[in-house]
Amino acid sequence: SAVISQKPSRDICQRGTSLTIQCQVDSQVTMMFWYRQQPGQSLTLIATANQGSEATYESGFVIDKFPISRPNLTFSTLTVSNMSPEDSSIYLCSVVPFGGEDEQYFGPGTRLTVT
Amino acid sequence: QKEVEQNSGPLSVPEGAIASLNCTYSDRGSQSFFWYRQYSGKSPELIMFIYSNGDKEDGRFTAQLNKASQYVSLLIRDSQPSDSATYLCAVNGGAGGTSYGKLTFGQGTILTVHP
């Protein structure tokens, strides 16, 4: 499986500000995704990060709030914009490596607290 | 709305026993099925995946899939206290379609293995 890192690992931010989360993989991957895990909840898919094109967002998530970039096959960013306390969550990137089937692996996550 | 339901927990088993975790899904087009283990404060770790009807064994873990019944389960033999975690069932969308790669998660089952 791929080695995935995320930066920052955690942050405390003020409402109204924005935070960009980075996801770096040690090898090229076919697919990259961003998920959110709210406190005490399971994971919810935010969007598919498409290499070289606009991300594909799930119902309830919009580009203005969660802009995503994926400039190459190993790197993606998720920005949480104009934050409110409701955005306090763990944000996780996941990847589908080349050469496997479609198993998906998760990064260590970014724990965001908005005050 | 695609749904994934897991048996309600928490589940408590004695050390050495078999732990049985169950999951049902609503989308008949689902192609692949995953079990993740999540320790408190950590990201989900992939422990099993299964694509075909029947059983798949890996060490102490056995995944079982019945597509006709839309049912997938995970058995943990010789349970250890270190198996205590939340287990998440995840279902992948149909192969090649717009849902491909997008995981829908169940709510998770908390497993406690007591000595």
Image: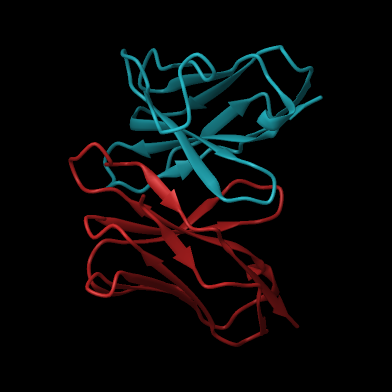
Chain colours: A cyan, B red
The answer to whether residue A112 shows anywhere in this view is no
Which residue is at a point 63% across and 69% down the rendered structure image?
B83
Residue A86 higher or lower than A62, as above or below: below
- Report the side of B30 relative to A66 (left or right): left
Q: Nearer the viewer, residue B36 or B97?
A: B97
Instruction: Identify the residue at the far right of this view.
Output: A115
Q: Residue furthest left?
A: B96
**A49 or A61: nearer the eye?**
A61
Is A109 above or below relative to B72?
above
User: How far across and down, in percent of the image, does residue B12 sit?
Assistant: 67, 80
Describe residue A60's horizontal placement relative to residue B39 as left or right.
left
Going by the image, does A61 lie left or right of B86? left
- Please state which of residues B23 and A86 is positioned toward the viewer in this rendering: A86
Q: x%, y% of residue B63? A: 38, 71
Residue pictured at 81% horizontal, 24% vertical: A115
Toward which corner of the image does residue A22 lie, by quadrant?
top right
Whether residue A31 can be seen here: yes
Q: Residue at x 47, y 28 (%)?
A: A25
Residue at x 41% of width, y 23% of height: A74
Total label count?
0
Q: Is residue B19 above or below residue A66?
A: below
Q: Position of residue A112 (x, y in %)?
A: 71, 29
- Quarter of the image containing the C terminus of chain B? bottom right
Residue B18 image point, x, y percent: 54, 85
